[in-house]
Amino acid sequence: MPRQPRRKPNRASPKRTASTESAFLNIPYDAAFENLYLAYIAGVSAFGLKPRAALEIPTSNRRLERILALIQECKYSIHDLSRVEVDRTPPPTPRFNMPFELGLTVALEKVVIPGHAWIVCETMRFRLKKSLTDLDGTDPYVHDGTVRGLFRELGNAFVRNQNQPTVDEMMKVYRILRANFKGVLYRAGATHPFNARVFRDLCVLASAAADDVVLN
């Protein structure tokens, strides 16, 4: 039987409600982004949404086709362009996956899924005006590379969402993920969180934590 969230009818603030709506996460997969990776899962779950990501895609599937299908399955998508700089690993190369998937999403929203809502996140203020001038007029949500900054910006991006968790409530969900992080890796036999099973287990844990923290 699915776990049923406990409700307290006397709470005055808005309650988180169950939702089948999903948010596609187009974010960097690297060790330096680990905290924000967990924060995205925690924050999106606190808003009652299901995180989705390209990490779910089996290697036997054609990756691009599955990414296109996955974006279309989601009502929202979040595109973090924090890794547009050239990396240090030879040969020095910028990261194109995130802007490429953002471009796919913009095209899909225009011609295939007009109800899809996408947002752009950044670490540095004003960098988007230089890195992607085609989006001139689009204001990114600048989280400054911090967990609390990300939760602040998610609150701004989803201000019309029925569920309105506070930054502190999102932090509580994040801390639960952090406290259980090594155990999740161990059970999956993984050394890093950027794989399908770890992502799935973190999302399940975040959803349960959000039920406890935001509903109660």
Image: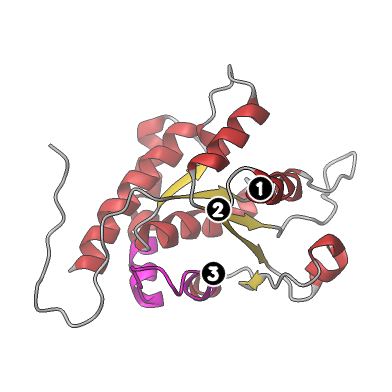
Mark 2 vs 1: CB contact within 8 A = yes
Mark 1 vs 3: CB contact within 8 A = no
Q: CA distance from mark 2 to mark 3?
A: 21 Å
**In the image: residue 68, left or right of residue 18:** right
Horizontal and vertical percent position of residue 208: 26, 52
Horizontal and vertical percent position of residue 64: 67, 30
In the rendered image, is residue 194 in sight? no
Q: Considering only vertical position in the picture, is 148 above or below 16?
A: below
Amino acid carrying label 3: it is: Leu
The residue positioned farthest toward the right in the image shown? 91
Magenta stretch, overall SS:
helix
Q: CA distance from mark 1 to mark 3?
A: 21 Å
Horizontal and vertical percent position of residue 93: 87, 44
Numbered disc 3: secondary structure: helix
Residue at numbered disc 2: 116
Q: Which residues are magenta?
A: 153-175
Q: Which residue lies at the image location 17% right of the left edge and 40% below the top edge?
A: 2
* Residue 150: mark: 3
Lower position in the chain sequence, tag 2 or tag 3: 2
Lower position in the chain sequence, tag 2 or tag 1: 1
Count residues near mark 3 (Cα–Cα under 10 Å), then give few for <14, some for 14-19, many for 20+.
many
State the quadrant of the C terminus.
Answer: bottom left
Q: Which residue lies at the image location 84% right of the left edge and 61% below the top edge?
A: 134
Numbered disc 1: secondary structure: helix
